[in-house]
Image (cartoon, grey):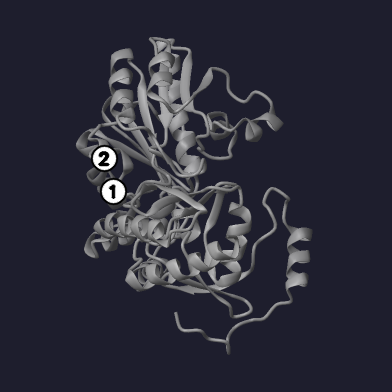
Amino acid sequence: MTRTTDSTTSIDTTAWRQRYADAMMRSFAPPLTMLERGEGCWVQDVDGKRYLDFLAGIAVNALGYAHPVWVEAISRQAATLAHVSNYFTTPQQLGLAERLLQISGAGDAGRVIFGNSGAEANEAALKLALLHRHATGKARILALNAGFHGRTTGTMALTGKPAQREPFGELIQGIDHLDSTLEALEAGFGDDVAALILEPIKGEAGVRPLPEGYLRRARELATEHGALLIVDEIQTGIGRTGAWFGFQHDGIVPDAITVAKGLGGGVPIGALIAFESAADLLQAGMHGSTFGGNPLATGTALAVLAEIERSGLIANAAARGQQLIERIAGIGSPLVEEVRGRGLLLGIALTAPIATELRATAQHLGLIVNAANESTIRIAPPLIVGDAEIDEFIALFTDALEAHA
């Protein structure tokens, strides 16, 4: 990214922070800075400072910033149709639904419904679980401790973080949370289970993959007990782990998956993809969204998927992820315990609870990463990341670690 200052709008930091505090609800922490523009894997703030972004909008900006394919797709679609009501369809909506069915493996036996976010997609998935529970009389829906599925009422009920649920009281009865072990899975499953909803890698818990064999055993148990297996691919989907979807590494077929984040490359969009008989659970009037599946979002998402395929970005995610694991280990810092995850969704486990301070130091040096918790730095760079960006990341992250050694 070429630094430009002539068009940069310098805004007094104290002033905009006060404006934010006055205008915005207090459900978010104060912003780290005010960003103005981006290109490739780099962003720039209103003071002209550049940052290497190894978070990509929390795994959203799959093609980085201002990618010409993405910009052209939005511009082209905005010049024809940006939105139509759900009384109609568009070539973009149908095309994206068919493409998602293809890459997910759902094929002709699957169906798609669109929303605006991962939380909306997971709300639709929860409705599948509740419909199946009502139809079968099975009382329980299972999710995982420390899992994260969104902040709507329904998705908070699924989220395995009590601190996020407790301010609102009991949200939905009959949802049980299991530890992410094979032993807990075996003990928790039974004929009273209607559905199991899980993430292949728990990103908000510190980028923690499920144990080896967990997804395969979950599929076996769900089939044995007549339960739905619903896989939340909001953070792991759209090529991020080195496959179109995280579940594909395990060779299973779920009953439904949810996608969002990287699908639109920055345009808000989410989707529920249901397989086989699960695709028939939602009937007319049971779910919908005014903006879900509009041509601007679906047309852009089609372009994102095409560019990921054309440029080999799924293979790049797999290769760059392994490269990053090896390069981070090669730093040799006593503060780095291990690197977890897959592809370009990685968690750097620390030997001391300094993730928040380390994140702040990295930002000061010009590197954006995330403290998933006090002992884990999460990185999720754009899928376009290459050697130059990885070299710069290692240099900046090494400096940040040395500042805390």
In the rendered image, is residue 71 in sight? Answer: no
- The location of residue 266, given as percent across then percent down, is 45, 60
Q: Which residue is mark 2?
A: 248
Residue for point 36% across, 72% down: 72
State the quadrant of the N terminus: bottom left
Mark 1: secondary structure: loop
- The location of residue 153, given as percent across then percent down, is 60, 33
- The location of residue 124, given as percent across then percent down, is 45, 34
C-beta proximity under 8 Å, tags 2 and 1: yes
Q: Is residue 102 left or right of residue 286?
A: left
In-front residue for pair 70/88: 70
Mark 2: secondary structure: helix
Residue for point 47% across, 72% down: 42
State the quadrant of the C terminus: bottom right
Q: Is residue 248 left or right of residue 337?
A: left
In-front residue for pair 95/241: 241
Q: Residues within 10 Å of mark 2 (few under 14, many from 20)?
A: some
Whether 348 is drawn above or below 282: the answer is below
Whether 358 is drawn above or below 69: the answer is above
In the rendered image, is residue 269 in sight? Answer: yes
Q: Which residue is mark 1?
A: 244
Residue for point 51% across, 40% down: 205
Kind of residue at badge 1:
Trp
Residue for point 53% across, 74% down: 37
Kind of residue at badge 2:
Gln
- The location of residue 357, given as percent across then percent down, is 63, 57
In-front residue for pair 332/155: 332
Toward which corner of the image does residue 160 lie, by quadrant? Answer: top right
